[in-house]
Image (spheres, grey):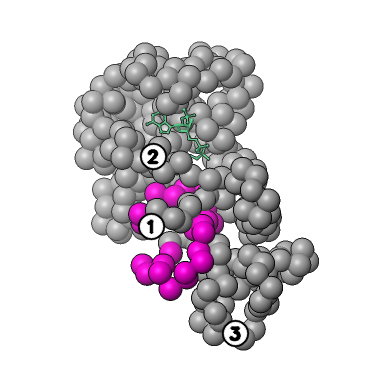
Amino acid sequence: MTGDRYDPSGHMTLLLKSFPARAAVWKRVFDAEGEAILTDPSATFDPAEVTVLACWVPPSDLSVYPNLRMVLSVGAGVDQMPDLPPNIMLGRTLAPGLNAAVRDWLVMATLLLHRDIPSYVSQKNARLWQKRPVARTRQRRVGVMGLGRIGRLAATTLAGLDFEVMGWSRNARQIKGITTFSKDDLHDMLCQSDILICVLPLTPDTRGILNAELFAHLPKGASLVHAGRGEHLVLDDLKNALENGALRSAMLDVTDPEPLPADHWLWADDRILLTPHVAAETDAEEGARHALAVLSALKSGLPIPGLVDLDKGY
Ligand code: NDP
Ligand code: OXD
């Protein structure tokens, strides 16, 4: 092996497959803690040393790493991961800074739609100075699909801004100041959601969940905020919902496909605000510290932070 630290004493070694800037940060953080890391997959090393592989997407043949115990997503999502052999665990990165960044984006998007900014963008383009009634947050009901680390943070922040906030999750959750709904009660939340936020993980249960049937349950003229995954949203149904007035506006951070082709209708539709999957990005230092916590748990047999439940898919 060349270049990276090599630990022949049986310690766990993490192989990071990522871009050089992230690799440099992880190497510095691991070196400071005296932990073994390989950051150059093209270097020569003994694949038997690799016990954890950190990456966005792993190579197709994992059998080259006979002692691999875990694949760790460097992001919050794991929907991009292929099915792994049953003896290999799957983890996701937990990073408070990433959760906070998505929370910021969701709150920003909600406020933009609450204050009807898409209409003012159109008016600006038409050089039209025309006032609309100023909406109050306490008169706006917001439904949050997904009450995980990010959804909870967004829900409580929005409640702090006086929005009337509801949230929906698989299991019943109790969150102070939020009206919560679980699995089969989605429609009860939808029919009261003037602004609907989606921050669900992408799983077989949630793929295509933002569709015509769901939009039909919203109050007429509702708005959609979406930072989950592009595949949650059926874009043809979004278009129809905007046309038939079921929806008034939307702000999207994720699309299917990504990047969005230059000739896609979304670009030209004034009712849509769009950002290119930038609600958050895992900070390299935070990611490295999470990976260290994973290694420590693996060594000590303690619960592994961010371990994915493969039955649930998140
Ligand atoms: P968590 O795993 O912490 O929470 C997921 C939430 O979704 C939980 O409340 C869970 O319910 C709920 N959920 C999952 N499946 C269902 C279902 N079938 N029906 C109802 N509720 C369901 O995830 P995070 O909050 O950390 O992240 C959520 C997603 O946000 C990520 O998977 C990723 O897709 C997206 N994301 C987007 C980013 C961006 O830049 N746009 C950045 C980071 C994340 P329960 O509580 O009962 O388990
Ligand atoms: C993630 C993302 O999952 O950036 O980390 O969407």
Tag 1 and tag 3, C-beta contact below 8 Å: no
**Residue depicted at 51% across the width and 66% down the height:** 67
Label 3: which residue?
1
Residue at the farthest right position: 32
Mark with earlier residue (2, 1): 1
Between 260 and 291, the one lying in front of the other is 291
Between 173 and 278, the one lying in front of the other is 173
Q: Amino acid at mark 2?
A: Asp
Residue 112 in view in this figure: no
Q: Position of residue 121 (x, y in %)?
A: 43, 39
**Residue depicted at 56% across the width and 81% down the height:** 45
Tag 3, which secondary structure? loop
Quadrant assignment, res 228: top left
> Quadrant where the N terminus lies?
bottom right
Mark with earlier residue (1, 3): 3
The residue carrying pointer 3 sits among few (fewer than 14), some (14 to 19) or many (20 or more) residues within 10 Å by Cα, namely: few
Q: Amino acid at mark 3?
A: Met
Tag 2 and tag 3, C-beta contact below 8 Å: no
Mark 1 or mark 3, which is nearer to you? 1
The residue carrying pointer 2 sits among few (fewer than 14), some (14 to 19) or many (20 or more) residues within 10 Å by Cα, namely: few
Label 1: which residue?
85
Relative to residue 198, is residue 52 depicted above or below? below
Residue 265 in view in this figure: yes
State the separation of the CA atoms marked 1 and 3.
26 Å
State the separation of the CA atoms marked 2 and 1.
14 Å
Label 2: which residue?
311
Characterize the magenta stretch by its predominant secondary structure: loop
Tag 2, which secondary structure? loop
* Magenta residues (range): 58-85
